[in-house]
Image (spheres, rainbow, N blue to C red):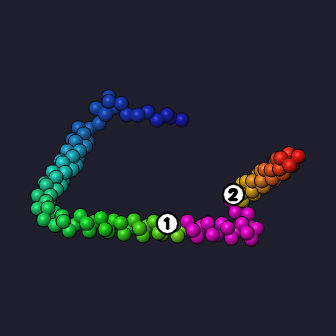
C-alpha cells in the first residue's frame, strides 16, 4: 500500500514548463479580474454616495421620522407575534398537563407544588403552636 505524500517543492519544479505557465496565467487572470471588479465596485460606491448625499440631506426631515415610525411598527408586529406564539405554547402546555399527557417539566412542577404545600403545612402548624403559646 502506497502512502500519500504531499507534493514537495522539488516535485513542483519537475512539472513541465508549459503547465507552470498555464497555472501562472490563470492565477494572474483571476487575480486581475477580481482586482478590476473591486475597483469598479469602489468607484460605483463613491459615485452613488456622491449623488445620494444631497438627496439624503434634503429629505432627512421626512426620512428620519419615517424610518423611526416604520421601525417601531415592525418591532411592534414582531413583538406581538412573539407574544402570541408564547401564549399559544403556554396554553398548549397547560392543556396537555391538565389532560394528563405529561408535558416536559411536569415532574418539576409537581415537585415544586408538593414542596410548597409542605412548607405551607409547616407554617400553619408553627402558627397554631405560636397561637397556643400566646394564649397560655
User: In this figure, which residue is indicated by the disc labeled 1?
Assistant: 82
- Snapshot quadrant of residue 90: bottom right
Q: Which of these two is toward me, 31 or 99? A: 99
Q: Is residue 132 left or right of residue 35?
A: right
CA–CA distance in space, label 1 to label 2: 22 Å
User: In this figure, which residue is indicated by the disc labeled 2?
Assistant: 105
Q: Is residue 45 visible?
A: yes
Q: Is residue 51 left or right of residue 120?
A: left
Which residue is pictured at 43% across the width and 67% down the height?
Answer: 78
Magenta stretch contains residue 94:
yes
Q: Residues within 10 Å of mark 1 (few under 14, many from 20)?
A: few
Q: Residues within 10 Å of mark 2 (few under 14, many from 20)?
A: few
Give coordinates of residue 74: x percent, y percent.
37, 68
Which residue is pictured at 19% across the width and 51% down the height?
Answer: 38
Q: Which of these two is toward me, 124 or 35? A: 124
Q: Is residue 36 left or right of residue 111?
A: left
| Upstream in sequence: badge 1 or badge 2 | 1
Q: Is residue 118 visible?
A: no
In this picture, which residue range is highlighted in magenta?
86-105
Which residue is pictured at 63% across the width and 69% down the height?
Answer: 91
Q: Which mark is residue 70?
A: none
Amino acid at each position: 500500500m502506497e502512502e500519500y505524500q504531499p507534493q514537495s517543492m522539488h516535485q513542483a519544479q519537475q512539472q513541465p514548463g508549459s503547465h507552470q505557465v498555464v497555472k501562472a496565467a490563470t492565477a494572474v487572470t483571476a487575480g486581475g479580474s477580481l482586482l478590476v471588479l473591486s475597483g469598479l465596485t469602489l468607484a460605483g460606491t463613491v459615485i452613488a454616495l456622491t449623488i445620494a448625499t444631497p438627496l439624503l440631506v434634503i429629505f432627512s426631515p421626512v426620512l428620519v421620522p419615517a424610518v423611526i415610525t416604520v421601525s417601531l411598527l415592525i418591532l411592534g408586529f414582531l413583538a406581538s407575534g412573539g407574544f402570541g406564539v408564547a401564549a399559544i405554547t403556554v396554553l398548549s402546555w397547560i392543556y396537555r398537563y391538565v389532560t394528563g399527557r405529561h408535558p416536559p417539566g411536569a415532574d418539576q412542577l409537581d415537585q415544586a407544588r408538593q414542596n410548597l404545600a409542605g412548607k405551607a403545612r409547616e407554617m400553619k402548624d408553627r402558627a397554631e403552636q405560636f397561637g397556643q403559646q400566646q394564649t397560655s
